[in-house]
Each structure stands twice: as C-alpha cells, then as structure tokens.
Amino acid sequence: MTFNKKNISRRDFITVGTLGLAATTIYPSSLFSSSSTDKNNYVSKRPPLKQRNFISSAVENTIKQTKGKIKDDKLSWMFENCYPNTLDTTVKHSEKDGRPDTFIITGDIEAMWLRDSSAQVWPYLQLMTEDKKLQLMIAGLINRQTNCIQIDRYANAFNDGPIGSYWETDNTQYMSKELHERKWEIDSLCYPIRLAYHYWKITGDTSIFDENWHKSMKLVVKTFKEQQRKDSLGPYSFTRDCDRPTDSQINNGWGAPTKPVGLIVSSFRPSDDSTQYGFLIPSNMFAVVSLRQLSEIETTVLGNMQFANECSELAQEVDNAIKKHGIVNHPIGGEIYAFEVDGFGNALCMDDANIPSLLSAPYLGYCTFDDVTYLKTRALIWSDNNPYFFKGKAGEGIGGPHVGLDYVWPMSIIMKGLTSNNPTEIKACLKQLKDTDGDTGFMHESFHCDDASKFTRSWFAWVNTLFGELVIKTLKEHPHILASTL
C-alpha cells in the first residue's frame, strides 16, 4: 500500500490509486481549489446530488441540524464536506442472492479494507433506526465482510470481484483474484465483529447472524489461535519485492521470533506497515474486546454455548497476557502499555496514528478513559518520548513510518479529542484540525508539521467520517465549544 513518486499530478495519482498503489504522494494545496476566509466562499464540496453514491435522509438531517449549531463558519463547512464523504463517494450498494450487499472503497484506492470500511460507516450507526435504507446498506457491508473472511481470513483488503491486483505477485501462500492485498493484521478480523455487534445492539436485527456468519467467526477464532503460534509458526508468511522495508517481513516472511505467551501475532499494523515485534498490543486489546462481543452474540442470538465459551476463554487468555507482558516500566513514563512486545522481554515503546492504537484503547472499549495505565501511556505517546510524535509550526500529533518523519496524521488529533473529556483539549484539537486542512475542506492522511499545505491523500474517507464523529460527539457532550468561533 505504498508508492512514492514526486511531482506526480493529481490526475496521475488517481490512476495510481486505481491500480492499488498507496497514496502517499505529497500534494501542495495549490493543486486544489483554495477556500477564502470569507464565509461566503465556503461552498459545499460535496458531489452534485445526482453523482452521490448513496443518500441517507437521516444523515442529511444530521448535517442540517449540526451545521446550524456550529458558529465557526470554516468548521461548519468542513463538517458538511467530511461527514457524508463515505456515502457520497465510496459506497456501492445492491442486493445479492436476496440479501443486501455493500462494497465500500477506502477512497483513492479501488479496494475495500475490512478495517476502513467498518470504520467509515461507524459514525452512521446511531442513525439506522431513523433510516431503513441506511440500515440495509450497513447490513450489506456486514454480509460482504462475512464472505470476504471466507475468501481469505488472512487478507486485509479485497476487490469487488475476481479482477486481480497490483500486489498479486507478493510472496505469500496464495493470492486469489478477489484479493487486493494479503497482509495479516489482527484488526482486520476485529472490525467486522465490532460492526456487527453494534449493528445488532442498535437495531435488534439478527438476520445478519446466519450460518454463513457463524462459519466466518469460526475462521476468525481459528486464525487467532494459529497466530498465538504455540505449536508452530502457522500457515501465514509474507514478503514483498520492494525497496521499502515496512512493506515486507523478515525471516522469510515469518517475522521476528516470538515466544508463545498467549498473545496473538500480527504480521502487520493497521497502517499496513510490518510489525517490529510480532505481538502488537493495541491489536491484541482489540481482539479481547471483539472476542467478548462475539461470545455474547453466540450465546444470546445463536445459542452456541461451546463456541461462546471458547471465545471467552481466548479473550481472557489474551487479556492476561497483555497485563503480564504488554505493560512495561518505562524510565520516563512509568508503568505504561508497550506498543509491541515479543514475549522474550523486548518491547517497543511508541504509538502509531492508525486505529487500533494505544491512544484509542478506551475508544475501542478495552479500558476506561480514566484507567491509570492508559493515562500514563497517553501522556507518554503524546510527547517527544514517542519517536513518532511530531510538533512544528503547523501543528502536533502522532504519525508513523507509513508516511515518514515530520508528518502528523489528523487521525491522531481526532482520536485525542474522542478520548478526552477536557473541553479545552477538545477545542484545541478541533482548532488544529480546522487549521491544517490545506485549504481543501477535507481531512487528509497526514500533513507536514511545519507546513499543512504539504499533505498526503486528498481522498481518504475514513478520516473524513472520523472527523464528523468528533464534531457530533462534541456537540452532544460539550455544545458550548461549537457555540463559539474556534
């Protein structure tokens, strides 16, 4: 998912994205229509009505109601552009075999990530009871993800059909034509559970939990257990012929050695970058939450008590291992969660902007927002003690090796706001997000900490809808913040 090419045109970039190459090209804001500080020039950048991929009456009502309560003209304009971006530009919804079916691309790449697609619709879930059409669209995504897991439980991204991929020459066990990329990431199997669980909790609809779904969930648990690597390295390995080390794995694709301690190996991070130590703690945290949600579904809806107990026991085993091996005594931060460990006592202390991250632990439901270890970890990773924390003239935040040094990911700033109950901190996050859009009216993958006009990915739907989620949460919990100009 990585392609670096300087001086590439915007049009060429869109072609590159279609081929499946990652959009890490750096754009100057001059490539895009600039917005004036004059509020009269804050014209909506949404596609014309007839060109929108999916229209939800509940989402449209939310946009109208929310905009009316945001005093800051630019923030209001950005919310209108960003919040519906997934529906406007990435959704392909239809019916297949009498059931709803939905394919959602990530944005500038014509492929569906299990992670991104789940996160892209997340801010809309609360509106499903107001809009049956929206509910069916999300049910269709759950159905599609269920089938994707059966195509390949180790893949992270899929095509809309057997069309092949730029990455089909990767060195791994098997790349079917339905796959866009086959990087093993724990969170790829967690996100579909999170989506289905909350869909059920909000709507009460259990039609998504058919035998096909249960079959996929059995594969999820099987994969997690294989990647605990207690008896063998398991069936998955991966290397890529490339000039970028983080796009491949060492030791003939098996990764760095790990000692079986109950944790689950993730060969890649949610950034699609390779792990340095195999036990990625944020993703193991996510697995604990997802397995417990899966156990509840299997118990309450399907009555599969044996499998439900298997899920609960695995969740507890992983959780115990996190507490024993994933918490380290940092010389500055004290007892904090490590980012990665190997079971031998080695640990990597940092955080990456992509979610699951250590910063997002309470957002995903692993711990409370006031958990002492989390708060210590949070303080450390939002400082120069995190090697991927960057601070400059334009802003500050967490990045990662996927884009490189000095590039802050807005996703991290949004997550800081979503995991805070401090109005001053939340307001500062919103202001920084408003000031670092590169005058485009949208969020991006990253921006240079000294110059926000230098950014990567002009069309990244996940971060756009995540920004919308922060605005709506702020309106609900701290409306006074939006009642004044930032």
Image: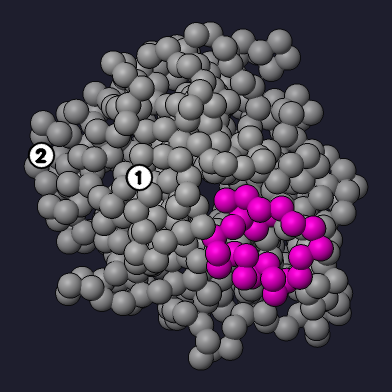
On the image, the x and y values in percent for residue 31 come to 81, 72
Give the residue displayed 76% in from the left and 70% down from the top.
9
Label 1, residues with CA under 10 Å away: few <14, some 14-19, many ≥20: few
- Mark toward the start of the polypeptide (1 vs 2): 1
Residue position marked by numbered label 1 in the rendering: 174
Give the residue displayed 50% in from the left and 66% down from the top.
110
Residue 10 painted magenta = yes
- Compared across the picture, whether 53 is left or right of 417 comes to left
Which mark is nearer the camera, 1 or 2? 1
Which image quarter: residue 276?
A: top right
Q: Do the residues bearing badges 1 and 2 touch, measured as CB atoms within 8 Å? A: no
Residue position marked by numbered label 2 in the rendering: 304
* Image: 440 above or below 22: below
Q: Distance between the residues labelled 1 and 2?
A: 32 Å
On the image, the x and y values in percent for residue 242 come to 62, 42
On the image, the x and y values in percent for residue 185 come to 44, 39
Residue 445 painted magenta = no
The three-letter code of the residue at mark 2 reads Asn
Q: Is mark 2 on a helix, strand or loop?
A: loop
Q: Nearer the viewer, residue 147 or 16?
A: 16
Give the residue displayed 53% in from the left and 31% down from the top.
249
On the image, the x and y values in percent for residue 274 come to 55, 34
Q: Is mark 1 on a helix, strand or loop?
A: loop
Tag of residue 102: none
Q: Can residue 367 be seen in this view?
A: no
The three-letter code of the residue at mark 1 reads Tyr
**Image: magenta residue range:** 1-24
Give the residue displayed 83% in from the left and 40% down from the top.
391
Which image quarter: residue 58?
A: bottom left
Label 2, residues with CA under 10 Å away: few <14, some 14-19, many ≥20: some
